[in-house]
Image (cartoon, rainbow, N blue to C red):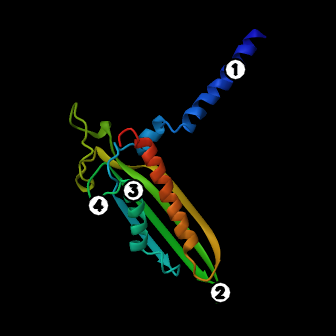
Amino acid sequence: MILRKLLVPAVVFGLWAPAEAAAQGSPSSRDRFALFAACRPVPVEVFVTNTGGPAGITTPAVEEMATSRLRAAGIDAPAGSAGGSTLQLSVFVSAQRLSPSAVVTVYVIRLRLLKLVYDQQSDPRPGEAGSPADAPGAAPEWLNWAPTWETPQQGIGFYLGRDGDPVTSLVGRMLDEFVREYVRVNEEAC
């Protein structure tokens, strides 16, 4: 009976402590692996495929949205710049007009952070570690790009007119989520 009285509070506290730490925003080991980059700027690669969808969903428009959000957070990098991470944003939109005023839109959006990771088993050099500053095209086989953070979204929307605002708003919210998490995990380095 005494053991049960001691065990129940210990279990409750054990479950409560990690939740409390997460609520305070301290990054977990998984968060640090996925997003930590010593607060270095993040270049963005944008891929847009729009088949009959709203005219406002284009590569330049989505690219501007992404870079402006990263710039506002102070973490934007010029496109094509070498570094240890890259943010990829893929947007696929297809729309079919059902009537003069009704459109069905299908969308798939994927936002992911790729980081250059070191594979010790593939490195033929004894005792040396890979350099995260190596350019992606020049990275040896023991340095590989791997997705460490991802947030995909997909759906079907029924809209009156050719309004792309719901898809554009979703892309904006996904970018905001990335910025919020990146800044939280890199806060001490910033």
Q: Secondary structure at mark 2?
A: loop
What amino acid is at disc 4?
Answer: Pro
Q: Is residue 5 toward the left or the right of residue 165 in the image?
A: right
**The N terminus lies in quadrant:** top right
Give the camera-side residue of 178 and 107: 178
What amino acid is at disc 3?
Answer: Leu
Instruction: Please tell me the numbered disc located at residue 9.
Output: 1
Give the camera-side residue of 24 and 51: 24
CA gap between label 4 and label 3 equals 12 Å
Q: Quadrant of residue 13?
A: top right
Label 2: how many Cα within 10 Å (few below 14, some 14–19, many 20+): few
| Residue 112 point in image, percent of width and height | 44, 55
Kindly identify which residue carries mark 3.
87
Q: Residue furthest bottom?
A: 100
Kindly identify which residue carries mark 2.
101
Q: Return the disc, 4 or 3, that comes first in the chain's sequence.
A: 4
Check whether the beta carbons of the residues at disc 1 and disc 3 lie within 8 A of each other.
Answer: no
Q: Residue at x 41, y 41 (%)?
A: 187
Q: Nearer the viewer, mark 1 or mark 3?
A: 1
